[in-house]
Image (cartoon, rainbow, N blue to C red):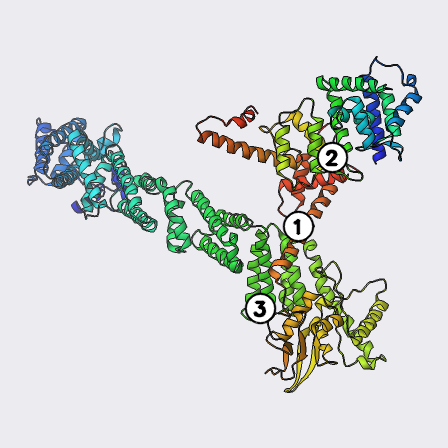
Amino acid sequence: STGVLLTENMNNNGTGSKELCGGMGGPQALLSDNDLNKLFESYKDTQEDAILSEGIERLCGDLGYKPDDFAILVLAWRLDASQMCQFTKAEFIQGLQRMNAASIEDIRARLQQIVERLRTDSTEDFKSLYRFTFRFGLEPGHRILSLDMAISLWRLVFTVHTPDILQRWLDFLEQHQHIRGVPKDTWNMFLNFVETCDIENYDDTEAWPSLFDDFVDYERERTGRIAQVKDDSGGEPPPDHSDYNGS
Amino acid sequence: MHHTENDKKRANFSALNPINGAIVKTTTTGKPGDVKKIIIKNMKSYPSIPENFEETTWNQLRKAVIAIQTSTPIEYSLECLCQAVSHMCEDKMDSQLYVNLTALVEKHVKANIVPFLSESGDKLVYLKKMNDYWQSHCQQMIMIRSIFLYLDRIYVLNNPTVHSIWEMGLELFRDHIAMNNLVQTRTVEGILILIEKERRGDTVDRSLLKSLLRMLSDLQIYRDAFEQKFLMATKHLYQAEGQAKMEELDVPDYLQHVDKRLNEEEERLEHYLDGCTRHQLIVTVERQLINEHVTGILQKGLDQLLEENRLNDLTRLYKLFCRVKNGTTELCAHFNAYIKKKGRTIVIDPEKDKSMVQDLLDYKDKMDNIVNVCFEKNEKFGNSLREAFEYFINQRSNKPAELIAKYVDMKLRAGNKEATEEELEQILDKIMVQFRFIHGKDVFEAFYKKDLAKRLLVGKSASVDAEKSMLSKLKQECGGGFTSKLEGMFKDMELSRDINFAFKQSMQNSEHKELQNIDLTVNILTMGFWPTYPVMEVTLPQELLQYQSIFNKFYLAKHSGRKLQWQPTLGHCVLKAQFDAGPKDLQVSLFQALVLLLFNYNAAISFEEIRTAVVIEIGELKRTLQSLACGKARVLTKIPKGREVENTDNFHFNNEFTNKLFRIKINQIQMKETTEEQKATEERVYQDRQYQIDAAIVRIMKMRKTLSHNLLITELYKQLTFPVKPADLKKRIESLIDRDYMERDKDNQNQYNYVA
């Protein structure tokens, strides 16, 4: 079933790249396979036919990013990397072809464009990146993202236009270490949640995943407590919580 | 003749002749049909009318009337006067005569008001005076009428607009006496004061009241002049009294007081009040004494009455509340709240678990009795009672179901001699009522099954009939699906009996003579019907192994394709033992037997040697040795002595063992069933529920292909028979999405699609 997923993503990325690179590069055939192969070889692991941690670190350095920068997540998405810390040869070469980039400079320029694009307006593209991020973070053979990984990836993927609720959501998760992990549906629905819903009008009889029920209960109780403290202290909200009053 | 006539007239005078109330109203039509004719003899010539006939005749009549009015003797005979009247009427002086008579009566009545206007002294004296005057007025009018009978009959009858003489008298009395403001106020106030005195407990002249009220009725001013004021006074009195007594009295006393008041008012109606006042009077009392205090009475006293089972007071409460609007509804609501509140204390406290079921049964009996005896078996209360029980019994999940199952086990176990078959049947019926309230019936089933298995396997069931009866009750209540496994257990037991019989026969004919002095009985349990038991590997003695393999062969020859798995944990044996004091039968578990058999070969064995020989799990083995060497019947001796068994202990056969009985049952020491085993059963139930939810979701989605979240939840609640929270259902849905049994719709996040 991973194979199927991959093809799907490829298609998505295919259309996406056309849009993103519209008018900038010529047809893919213009890129020289030779250049791409050379680039791959320069980062390739000595044993395996793939770029692994060490190569990726070097690649990031050459691009001027840290490995845990948002742009690198974007790169992995554009290359449609199947797992972390690894670009296979096919992923690397086909991905760069789709990006129309044959050099470090090209890649850097494209990534800047894409990040800028995501920052301004591209809901569908962001959704694609968001969904990719879940699959990207899975351990091979797993169906559920570990809680720690989910927290890191949520923080990372929302680097551009961070939702108001994100920090509270991550706080909630950190407070509840017994949560077994985040399944795909919950991951995907969180994007719907931040786009269409908030604590005030949340309705637990709707089809939201149960983790959101718990989150909203937790938040309501917590803000209820704060409101109480506020009342007790004569109406002046505690300064460290003032940012919650808007929501 | 005079007498009869007079009697007839008197019949029109209701106040003097109170045969019945209706007569009062008949004064206008009270013309006796059989008036005695005055026979006038033929005269020789037609008489001429004397010139001053009218004047002289009226003078005679006037004198007579005045004589009546002044209670002086009349100088003319009645006959003569009557004749005079009839003469005047026949000579067409009737209308003038009527006018004259009216004027005469009016003058008299008018004059009589004087004493009633003067400064009144004593109210009672005033009333009596009024009554006397009224009585004499009526008497006078009767006498006047008897003289002017002819006028009444001929003239009045022919002139519909003219009142009869009797009515004319009433009208004049009303206009000139009763309608006088001062007189009316004094009279009515006097009456009200008398009634109030009576209500405060004094004795009053009821006949005076009755007569005066009849007067008001006859004068047709009862309603306007009296009734309204009377009802107002009643309202004010009871309004104040209701508030005061509610403060002052306990609820039972208050209710008794209300009852008394209502009876008193009924009596008042019977003795002197007009019947037309009944409805309004009673409603007024009810409103002030009951309606106004419905909530107060219920909040202040209902719980206590129920608590103390005060049947008489509750009956009174119910009857009184039936009289007012919403009374029973309010009562029912408070009754319901009490049952829930009190019932919760029965089930919620783990300290009381031991007596919970018996308490529930007693509580239900008590409340049923109250509904039947005090609340007239009112259906509304019966339903409310059931609703309340169902509510509170499920306030604590699982435990009531478990304890009810255990209670049934206790009743169905042998050695329970406290009940006859019939009583047992009744108890089971009552238990079923409680069972009906339980939401998590699967919990009951799990525990019931475990206990039933024990009863069947150890042969501890008291009565097959009772077992079957209970089973059929469960089947009736929950359907065949619920009991199919339990029925399967009974079937297994029956089949096992047949198989054992056949097996024993085959053994007799076999060549295994050496085994014939061992008696083996095997119960074949179908896996799935019975609770799951842990599989334990143990080392059996040679004879038993041989026996097992013979049985295996025998059984599999008949039922090929089946697999037999022996359950050593469930086996039990009778061993013959030879002590110094003589032979004994020891009734022991298989584990105990395995240990004891080792001592056939060695008199003393160490713990480790025993363990190597029988290979029983170490905890189980320690408990087994404890039961044999440290319990009541110590057929082994432990060295060193002590309550606990250690790995370094040694054991030897206790030859000096004595016991009064020949057959001795040595109980295996049980693991603390209440904690671990119970948790395991609960966990199984919980697991089972998850499977059932998953299965239901998949079943529904498979049928509907695509379904919104809310519809799916609704559908699930229809199908699931145990209590479950929406959040639990959500988790199962998430799990199924995660396992690709279904998926969230791409465009509508509230909709799911089935994944084939």
Q: Which mark is residue B421?
A: 3
Q: Residue at x 40, y 49 (%)?
A: B302
Above or below residue B754? Residue B364 is: below
Q: Could you classify mark 3 by the number of other residues whose Cα lies within 10 Å: few (under 14), some (14-19), or many (20 or more)?
A: few
Above or below residue A239? Residue B152 is: below
Which of the two discs, 1 and 3, labels the residue nearer the N terminus?
Answer: 3
Locate residue B386 relative to residue B30 in the image: left or right: right
Above or below residue B633? Residue B87 is: above
Q: Residue at x 82, y 16 (%)?
A: A21
Percent coordinates x, y for residue A189 in the rendering:
70, 31
Percent coordinates x, y for residue B689 in the rendering:
68, 48
Q: Residue at x 86, y 28 (%)?
A: A43
Give the image quarter of residue B544: bottom right
Q: Which mark is residue B614?
A: none
C-alpha span from label 2 to label 3: 61 Å
Give the image quarter of residue A10: top right
Instruction: Work out which quarter of the rendered image holds the C terminus of chain B and state it.
Output: top right
Q: Are marks 1 and 3 on the same chain?
A: yes
Disc 1, SS: helix
* Chain designation of label 2: A
Disc 2, SS: helix
Q: Which mark is residue A184?
A: 2
Would you name the residue on which mark 1 appears?
B686
**Amino acid residing under circle 2:** Lys
C-alpha span from label 2 to label 1: 26 Å
Disc 3, SS: helix
Q: Are marks 2 and 3 on the same chain?
A: no
Locate residue B550 relative to residue B677 in the image: left or right: right
**Amino acid residing under circle 1:** Tyr
Q: Could you classify mark 2 by the number of other residues whose Cα lies within 10 Å: few (under 14), some (14-19), or many (20 or more)?
A: some
* Chain designation of label 3: B
Percent coordinates x, y for residue B98 in the rendering:
17, 29
